[in-house]
Amino acid sequence: MPRKRAAAALGALHRRITGAPGAHLWLAALFVTTVLPHALPASGGFLRPRSTGLQELAQHPVRALTAGALWTDGVPWLAYAALFTLVHATAEHWLGTPRWVCVAVLAQTVPVLLFERVLNWLVRHGHTPEASFNSLGIDAGYGLAGAAAVLTYRIPRIWRYPYVFAVLVFFGVLLAGGRSFVGPGHVVAALTGLACLPLTRTAGSLRKTEHPSAQ
């Protein structure tokens, strides 16, 4: 009996991981990028050239956006592991990997491009110091906020407004931790996820067609 239970648990874990490969690969990459810098003598120097500051975005936009998606900005990796399992894996399993990738990429990039313009305007008009050009302004929470928001369309309508409010408060206030552009960025990422409604239509039926044996 214990062996059967262990086998069933391993089978469930295997189905969970294979049903959301993108989320777990991203989580594994975050493990590397959060553990390795702490093992280096100068972790700040390791991350700073790959920041999402305005100068880096202007010179190397793809690298800067990718680095932002692999940055936890002080949030423990275990917290991200729980959130990725709860949010990203659920969204990917529901939407399918291609559409989940679209949601995650949009949620990671739209806030950055928007706040790049805002920050650039603030610096040019003297409302914020030029040091803001080198600020680390994005983390993996942007994609999480977008995925959490798109799951709004998976729950009953009666619970959608309270759920959206909870998502905005959690990602915009609690997970941001008072960091200047991160809180508003998470809110924009969540709104981006909400705007992905067209990607959610027929999501469940499409998933059943792709994986009939899993039902």
Image (cartoon, rainbow, N blue to C red):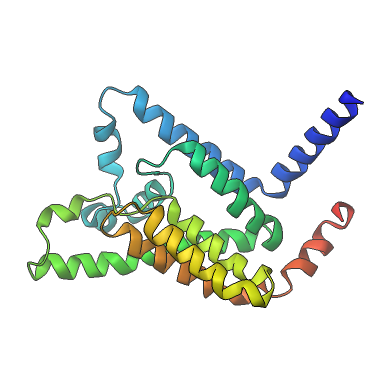
Q: Residue at x 85, y 52 (%)?
A: 214
Q: Position of residue 68 (x, y in %)?
A: 38, 49
Rendered image quadrant of residue 174: bottom left
Which part of the image, by quadrant, shows the C terminus?
bottom right
Q: Nearer the viewer, residue 125 or 3?
A: 3
Residue 2 visible to an observer of this rendering: yes
- Left or right: where 13 falls relative to 78: right
- Left or right: where 41 falls relative to 14: left
Q: Position of residue 104 (x, y in %)?
A: 52, 59
Residue 106 visible to an observer of this rendering: no
Position of residue 96 relative to residue 205, above or below, is: above
- Left or right: where 12 falls relative to 145: right
Rendered image quadrant of residue 198: bottom right
Q: Residue at x 29, y 54 (%)?
A: 178
Q: Residue at x 66, y 55 (%)?
A: 90
- Left or right: where 123 falls relative to 209: left
Which part of the image, by quadrant, shows the N terminus?
top right
Find the residue positioned furthest to the left.
Answer: 126
Q: Nearer the viewer, residue 202 or 176?
A: 176
Position of residue 115 relative to residue 133, above or below, is: below
Q: Residue at x 63, y 60 (%)?
A: 98
Q: Position of residue 206 (x, y in %)?
A: 77, 67
Count of numbered badges drawn on the protein: 0
Q: Position of residue 199 (x, y in %)?
A: 63, 72
